Image (cartoon, rainbow, N blue to C red):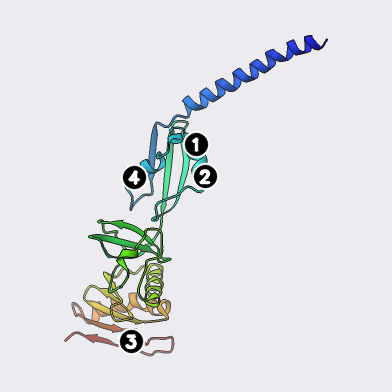
Amino acid sequence: MKKKKRRKIWPVVFAVILFLIILAAAVVLLFRTRTVKVKGNSYYSENTITTLVQRDKLSVNTLYILLKYDFLEPELPAGIKQLNISLENPWTVRVTVEEKEMAGYVDYDEAYLYFDGDGTAALKTKKQIEGVPYIEGLVFDEGAVELGKTLPVEDDSIFDKIVDASRNLKKYNLTPDRISCAEGDVRLYFGIVEVLLGDDNYEEKLQQVSPILEKLSELYPDTAGTLHLENYDSDSESIPFVPAG
């Protein structure tokens, strides 16, 4: 009786093994990576993202790529917040890139160094990113710069002010041509108009900028000058504008 049971079990075992082999072969062949489609990228080229996604040997399989980026925590470039992966079909990977928002950029090593809202050095490139302000006068240790790490500034307080100002500039859809911190406070430049923000209360001050600039263009067209917001608060009755010269 025991021998007959064993004889009956072996065909089942063989069938299961054969099925698993066929299944594995199907997974390997059907889910072989042939195409990578990229969208949402601005700072990084499509080729850079494709190379990133396919950089290890197992990435020849689309299921592996899906599992890696959706369930693990793979290392990403400092300027990328997240990669969202989906399969268009078993052999085509769709990559949606979620890049970090940049607070500003400085000159660095014959290129531009961008940093995000947390002060992290996120991207080095020779390309200017639209809508990100240039920062003048920010002193930092160029020899200690490392992508993915906090920008090694000389004065932490001024750096915090720049990040705070940049965050609120985005909130109120303001895009200055440049930001200066050369004299220890924050100054914005919108064309020929200089805006002094001082060292605190940026959100309340920046709420005033857009309507004031519109009014200045009516009252003082093509007039260079300085808008003094450094002492502004909710109790202020007026905001001085001093024409240049």
Residue type beneath disc 2 = Asp
For the residues labelled 4 and 1, the Cα–Cα distance comes to: 19 Å
Which residue is found at the position 36% from the left and 41% from the top?
A: 51
For the residues labelled 4 and 3, the Cα–Cα distance comes to: 48 Å
* Image quadrant occupied by the C terminus: bottom left
Q: Which residue is mark 2?
A: 70
Tag 1, which secondary structure?
A: helix
For the residues labelled 1 and 2, the Cα–Cα distance comes to: 10 Å
Are the residues flagged by discs 4 and 1 in contact, CB closer than 8 Å? no
Disc nearer the start of the sequence (4/1): 4
Disc nearer the start of the sequence (4/3): 4
Out of 102 and 126, give the one closest to the viewer. Answer: 126
* Image quadrant occupied by the N terminus: top right
Are the residues flagged by discs 1 and 2 in contact, CB closer than 8 Å? no
Q: Position of residue 93 (x, y in %)?
A: 43, 37
Query: Alpha-carbon neighbours of circle 1 within 10 Å: few (<14), some, or many (≥20)?
Result: some
Disc nearer the start of the sequence (1/2): 1
Q: Which residue is mark 4?
A: 48
For the residues labelled 4 and 2, the Cα–Cα distance comes to: 19 Å
Mark 4 or 3, closer to the camera: 4
Are the residues flagged by discs 3 and 2 in contact, CB closer than 8 Å? no
Q: Position of residue 236 (x, y in %)?
A: 39, 89
Residue type beneath disc 3 = Ile
Residue type beneath disc 1 = Tyr
Query: Alpha-carbon neighbours of circle 3 within 10 Å: few (<14), some, or many (≥20)?
Result: some
Q: Which residue is mark 3?
A: 239
